Amino acid sequence: MKRIGILLLCGLLIFTVAMCGCTTATETTTQPQTNANTNTNTQIQNQIKPQVLTLGAQNDFKDSFESKSLVFDTLMKYNDDFSPKPNIIESWEVSKDKKTYILHIRKGVYFTNGKEANADVVKFSLEYWAPYRYCRYIKYLDSIEKIDNYTLKLKFKEPYAPLLEELPRIYLTLPETVDDKGNIIKWIGTGPFILKEYQKGQKAVLVRNDNYWNKEKIPKIEKVIWKVIPDENARIMALKSGAVDAIGVTEHYLSVPAQRIPELQKTPGLKVMIADKGTIETYCFNYKKGPLTDKRVRQAIAYAIDREGISKNLFNGIPQPTGHLLLPEFKNGPKNVKPYYYNPEKAKQLLAEAGYKDTNGDGILEDKDGKPLRLTLITGNTQMERDTAVYIQKNLRDIGIDLNIVCLEKKARKERAKKGDWDICRTHPWVAPPVRYLKWRCMDDGYDSFGIKFGVNDRVKELINIIYTGSDEEIKNAWNELWKIEYDFCPATGLYVRPRVFVFKDNIKGFRFDPDVGCIDLSNVTIE
């Protein structure tokens, strides 16, 4: 009986507690505080929402240099004005003669395999990456001395001014993670994400590096899916359907068709971000053979292009028209020269001075031997590239030039560009800071996969040497003279600024344009 009584008492207590619990819940749902509790629950749900970001990308993950910024650090970074700022190199000292640099390496930086980023690793990275990242310091470097585990002394054979501007180009990598051709073979870095899965030409999956050394920049995003969608319109469809969360983020150039930006701006659930600066869409001229060996013909074409018409009539005024090769506001930009502008009458005058006439009345000019002025333009196969070429075709027809347009996919275009089998070629634009461009495309006048280089004469090469080794005043004067030569010689002409454009779901916050267009900064991105 005693046992039965105890059991009955326990049962009564359980029943009472259960009833009290039910009463409390019921009372809570009928109180005015219900909305507050609901809001709190919603906030909690938002906080625990999976932070998985799917990016629609034009290019394969490992073939894209932008992707490296997710996994690897660079030795330094750029401020918005392209002045260098600390990163792995946290401080530095420069001798007055600019022949000695002391680099202090940040402590506590580790690769995801546990190895420390010390002076030996930084020394290797400096020596390895320079030629592959078009950094000219390697030519002038005399020695790199390890002072201690976190300090290096760089000595140069002669004064070398732009070292710090080049260090944001240098990846921090372990020797065993690269081959002897500038390729990363093991994606083990110190950056904010870790590459976990890779399917060539299809996708890559990255997870957050929770041990990332830069605590202020540890991403909120836990996983990034890099989904390869080569076609620009297919990427837009994928965004609208929800298959991806953002497009344009993975490319260092404008990869969203400008014609479709107004449509995307009006699409519910999407947000469009347009950078206020960018690189310039540029056509180069084959000044080594054919009709464009005559400077007057090159200049005539530059004056014949209606850049404002292209921007307004084709692209809703989104790209800023310009006849510059680089925006003057950038450091060492072409501030001392005037851009080419739309002046068809001046273009016709230059062609007449070059000896061209329309002798048969067909609207196409002929040279003194009666040969029609027919040119070939090779360009890309995107909608924006095709439309631009067709518009310019009409501009040139108006001054008596017959332009044949050849639109090619990237690989075929690069192969033909290297052969010099063209008159006009869509080329790689100048980049900021422009010192980065000099070693890459200004040291000679040869053909490359982007057309023809800008080393138009020996004086350009002399000026480049001054830019690398001169005093501040000598460097300033050298840049001014270099721009005068390039603009007068007219090896190329700018068309319009191609700003980077991000398009993404409107529940995503925190995107920003890094000054370095090759860097993807997801540090403040969150999904609500």
Image: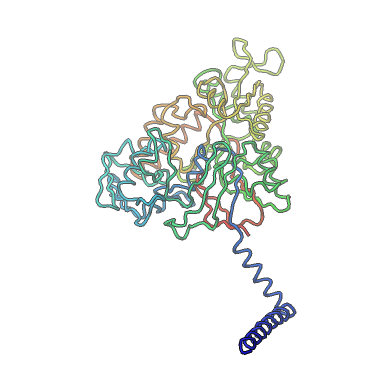
Residue 316 at x, y percent in the picture: 70, 42
Which residue is farthest front? Answer: 1
Q: Tell me which residue sits at (25%, 45%) in the image.
A: 145
468, above or below 273, in the image: above
Which residue is farthest top? Answer: 369
34, above or below 186, in the image: below
Q: Quadrant of the C terminus?
A: bottom right
Q: Quadrant of the N terminus?
A: bottom right
Counting the numbered discs, the total is 0
Residue 336 at x, y percent in the picture: 48, 40
Splitting the image into 4 quarters, where does residue 106 fall? bottom left
Residue 498 at x, y percent in the picture: 59, 41
284, above or below 308, in the image: above
In this picture, residue 232 sits left or right of residue 165 = right
Q: Nearer the viewer, residue 214 or 143?
A: 214
In this picture, residue 268 sits left or right of residue 334 = right
Residue 513 at x, y percent in the picture: 55, 50
Q: Nearer the viewer, residue 95 or 201?
A: 201
Q: Tell me which residue sits at (53%, 42%) in the image.
A: 327
Which residue is farthest right? Answer: 30
Q: Nearer the viewer, residue 519 or 199?
A: 199
Q: Tell me which residue sits at (56%, 21%) in the image.
A: 422
